[in-house]
Image (tube, rainbow, N blue to C red):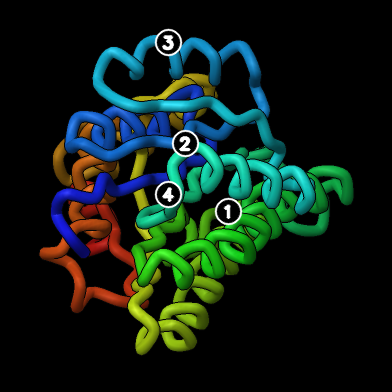
Amino acid sequence: MNDTVQRVAFVTGAGSGIARATAQAFAEAGYAVALVDRDREAGARAESELSELGSCRFFAADVTDDASVKDAVTRTLSAFGRLDAAFNAAGIDGEHGNRTADCTLENWHRVISVDLTGTFHCMRHQIPAMLASGGGAIVNCASVAGLVGAATFAAYVAAKHGVVGLTRTAALEYAREGITVNAICPGTINTQMNRNLPADLLQGLLAASPMGRLGEPSEIAATVLFLCSDGAKFLNGQALAVDGGWTTQ
């Protein structure tokens, strides 16, 4: 791509956490950024703050609603003219504490709808936009729970394993058309979601960490930015654990 053409990134869940940090990293790297979130207040706040760094627009969308996602992608193309990178990070962890047979149907359907089906909705509309732009890079936010089991998190683990499988399938399908698709699998990161975990569970996760600390959203953001860069053009279909070494144990 001509270096004089500004690259465009699409980030879901951009109002907070890892996605917010990644949207900032894209903006600092010179991308125009579509900030996508169902939380209008958080999205508008992110737009106001990140617009100081460059061209950033907030588009309200719920990833569980395919038409809503399609509209956000369409509005991104109308605003910026192309799509080069996407970070599909909108997600929830759902209920925890129940073993698989006690996982409620409501929790199961909600987590799968947001974390897995939501990712599919995004890719379904991002891929044609990237093909029209000459290629691109998609990074899906999975989790270390997409690589291993995690007791009492049946819905979340299933959803994140599904994200990894979806990532690998699309990576095979579009590799020769200039689109790379990878998944990032964060460990325990210093976000509100993890700070809301029961204290004993969080302490157990920290105790099991080789580094003895939480990861920072900016560390995940830096990895996503690399996966969308020219330096990662031969990286495709990978589920990359960014977990301080937790999954090596």
Q: Secondary structure at mark 4?
A: strand
Disc 4 designates what residue? Answer: 87
Q: Which residue is mark 3?
A: 48
Residue at point 50% right, 37% down?
79
Return the residue at label 2.
Answer: 34
Residue placed at 26% from the left, 45% from the top? 6
SS of the residue under disc 1:
loop
- Residue 72 in the figure: left or right of residue 13: right
Left or right: 240 in relation to 146: left
Q: Which mark sits nearer the N-terminus, 2 or 3?
A: 2
| Residue 216 in view here | no
How many residues crowd mark 2 within 10 Å: few (<14), some (14–19), many (20+)?
A: many
Task: Please tell me how crowded label 3 is: few (under 14), some (14-19), or many (20+) other residues with Cα within 10 Å.
Answer: some
- Going from N to C along the chain, the mark reached first, 4 or 2, is 2
Residue 178 percent coordinates (x, y): 33, 78
Q: Earlier in the sequence, mark 1 or mark 2?
A: 2
Residue 140 percent across, percent down from the top left: 45, 57
